[in-house]
Amino acid sequence: RPSARHGSSTAPSARCPLSGCIPDGLPHAMAPARSPVANSKGVEGGAPSAEALDFLLFLGRAEKTVSSFAERAIETQNEAEVEILRAKARAYEAALRSRLERWEGIQESAADRYRSRIEEIVPSLENRLTEHRRMKEAAAAAAETPAVAITGKGAPERAEEPASA
């Protein structure tokens, strides 16, 4: 019969026969709950797999890269360059969708979270470009608006300057 204490073995690297965890001296009833089905990344089993880590790294880099595309598109005023950056963002999105579909063992809730992040890649680029275009148009409109002088009835009267002697 296994020990009533969690990890009661004296060997430092011994594993508990009930849960396979490293001994920490807590009774099993007091040990933190562990999900045998999924870890924090939404995959079955213990630690995230190499596939999961690779996907998450790629997703993070793609998001950061597309954000830099927006900055580059704003700096360049070349519409052909902007279209190339849009195509690259769509390619990242397609590659990430493909990897997510091939990822075996991922929980549906985690897949939905990652799918949402993937779906935001291209719109985030478009939103930044639209915001920049609006700001640019507003600045141009403000520069074109002529100064309006108030004249006629109700206009403030000018104080007369004293005559010099």
Image (spheres, rainbow, N blue to C red):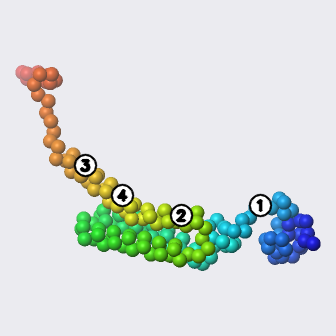
Q: What element carries label 1?
A: loop
Q: Which of marks 2 and 1 is nearer the N terminus?
A: 1
Q: Residue 127 carries which label?
A: 4
Q: Is mark 4 on a helix, strand or loop?
A: helix
**Crowd band around label 1 with a 10 angstrom C-alpha radius: few (<14), some (14–19), many (20+):** few
Q: Which of marks 1 and 3 is in front?
A: 1
Task: Give the residue drawn at x 89%, y 65%.
Answer: 5
- Quadrant where the N terminus sits is bottom right
Residues marked 2 and 1 touching at CB (< 8 Å): no
> What residue is disc 3 on?
138
Q: Which of marks 1 and 3 is nearer the N terminus?
A: 1
Residues marked 2 and 3 touching at CB (< 8 Å): no
Quadrant location of residue 152?
top left
Q: Earlier in the sequence, mark 4 or mark 1?
A: 1
Q: Which amino acid does label 1 sit on?
A: Pro
**Crowd band around label 3 with a 10 angstrom C-alpha radius: few (<14), some (14–19), many (20+):** few
Q: Which mark is residue 32?
A: 1
Q: Which amino acid does label 3 sit on?
A: Ala
Q: Residue 112 carries which label?
A: 2
Q: Which of marks 3 and 4 is nearer the N terminus?
A: 4
| 147 shown above or below 67 | above
Task: Give the residue drawn at x 34%, y 72%.
Answer: 87
Image position, residue 2 (x, y; %): 90, 71
Quadrant location of residue 153?
top left
Q: Earlier in the sequence, mark 4 or mark 2?
A: 2
Image position, residue 52 (x, y; %): 58, 74
Q: Nearer the viewer, mark 4 or mark 2?
A: 2
